Image (cartoon, rainbow, N blue to C red):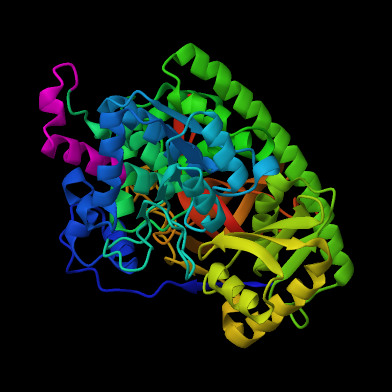
Amino acid sequence: MSSIQVKNRPHVDADFLNLSCSPLLKQLYANRGIKNESELDNSTKTLLHAKQLKGIDVACELLYQALLCSRKIVVVGDFDADGATSTALSMLAFRALGFTNIDYLVPNRFDYGYGLTPETVDLAIAKGAQLIMTVDNGISSINGVAYAKKQGVQVLVTDHHLPAAQLPDADAIVNPNQHGCTFPSKNLAGVGVAFYLMLALRSYLAEKNYFASQPTQQAPNLASLLDIVALGTVADVVPLDANNRTLVQQGLARIRAGICRPGISALISVAKRNQAQLVASDLGFSLGPRLNAAGRLDEMSYGVELLLCDDPMQANIMANELDALNQSRREIEQGMQEEALQTLATLKFDEENMPHALCLFDAQWHQGVIGLVASRIKEKYYRPTFVFAQGNEGEIKASARSIPGIHIRDILDLVDKKIPDVILKFGGHAMAAGLSLKTGDFQLFSDTLNSVLSEQVDESILTNVLLSDGQLTGQQLSLEQAQELREAGPWGQAFPAPLFDGEFTILQQRLVGEKHLKMVLEYEGKSIDAIAFNVDLKTWPNPMVKKVFCAYRLDVNEFRGNRTVQLLVELLIVQ
């Protein structure tokens, strides 16, 4: 297993920032590349304009003609949280804009695979589709789009994944990552792309005097959908650039004020989170997994229906069912993770003989959970990890998770060029990807992948480095400072939550749950609560240990109405 190094984040002089916040927060912003105060303005006026998206006018005209002719539109979504939020947002926006001949489907991942396949097109046609609009998928669906066009069905692709050299022959494509698109942010999630399309469509309909000609139809305020945008954006772990931070912050503000979909409030309730104090990490670690559970183990349409639901009581029932599914997912994932770790343990890897990438396959593993297992193994060994499960007959499917510095989708492209026709299909982005192979090609793929990585990757990238914002004083370990950091941000991918480090004395330690270590630490004469998750039970608890080094996040713990400072320990080393 790779060792972890802690290094101080590069220090940037923060004096140029004229902010009304603590010196600590100002320094944190400067260290994360904030150049001026305007970059921290998360008001809606700062959002990039939809007109900059390539293909947006063609897409709007396509939808406008469908509205005028009452053509049946079927939204085809992906089976993760981004896909569910994209689908729900599109349906709600269409309704608000006056579209009535609409429907959606999210194909079962186990039966129909990823993207707009010909089989999925048939499902859409069975629903009467005359225009298919993909959300969070479609940019790699060459065959599916061709099949739809052959059947006389128009196709509008909205996606954010990286395109291949060949694009599908769709009637319109909206994707900030397609070649020639000048939209400044390439980091929109699928739900962000769908939101921008709906903003553009509202403006397009207004320009056509559609709302003026419909006395019962007003131009809707689509900002009401930002709660859904925030959830999908954070859950899909896209980089939180300035534009995405605004989308998330605006959504969080609505959620905290109670102005959000009943389904989102219900998910917050079953996750036992405080809605008025919700932060971005709650969307990613508490709400997202519960929504994702529908697509991993069952039908993601159930998650879509939760977001579409207008009845709070029914939403609570559905959220509790998703919570139960999520618990089942955890149990399945835990079993698969233990099996994967046992397999790796038999290989007796150490830092000297660790391969550049880890590839694992078991025919009994659950296809819906392999991405989570890949993520856990990647975190433990700090290597790009591919976890395969049985797919269709004669095929295996993998979910891959990568580490910073290794663009996994680009690496797969290189592997595909080196061994043509071995990878049946693949897609994804920098940190996550999916692919399928013939069962007998597993070892060839694994060997070629590691060969390509050995040629492309600098060895230094394979060392896990935690970037710390330095040490805090005892005075800074306060509830007020912790609250300020919670309310700042929003923190997330590429705009990381503050991480600090220091040496502490352990006053108390005990296990809570199965693998969590609850501690009371002392620093500069001040005692403070701390918790470390998923500790090594061979090491902890240990009453003999008195001094520890911690890399931690400063947070607020809420329990029975009381709010106290708590350290969330990410690295715990005996001194």
In the image, residue 122 above or below residue 423: above
Tell me residue 518's x, y (percent).
64, 44
Tell me residue 33's x, y (percent).
30, 68
Quarter of the image where the C terminus is located: bottom right
Q: Nearer the viewer, residue 223 or 394?
A: 394
Q: Point out the stretch of residues depicted in magenta.
A: 196-217
Quarter of the image where the N terminus is located: bottom right
Q: Nearer the viewer, residue 318 or 11?
A: 318
7 in the magenta segment: no
- Tell whether 520 sits left or right of 215: right
- Tell whether 421 sits left or right of 29: right
Q: Residue at x 46, y 58 (%)?
A: 168
Tell me residue 308's x, y (percent).
44, 24
Q: Residue at x 67, y 76 (%)?
A: 420
- Residue 82 showing in the rendered view: yes
Q: Residue at x 74, y 77 (%)?
A: 355
| View extreme (bottom): residue | 455
In this figure, what is the number of numbered marks?
0
- Residue 544 showing in the rendered view: no
Question: In the picture, residue 93 is in which quadrant?
Answer: top left
State the predominant SS element of the stretch in magenta: helix
In the image, residue 443 above or below residue 188: below
203 in the magenta segment: yes
Q: Nearer the viewer, residue 446 or 90?
A: 90
Question: In the picture, residue 132 is in which quadrant?
Answer: top left
In the image, residue 433 above or below residue 509: below
In the image, residue 37 above or below residue 287: below
Q: Residue at x 40, y 30 (%)?
A: 72
Tell me residue 551's x, y (percent).
54, 61
- Tell whether 132 sits left or right of 550: left
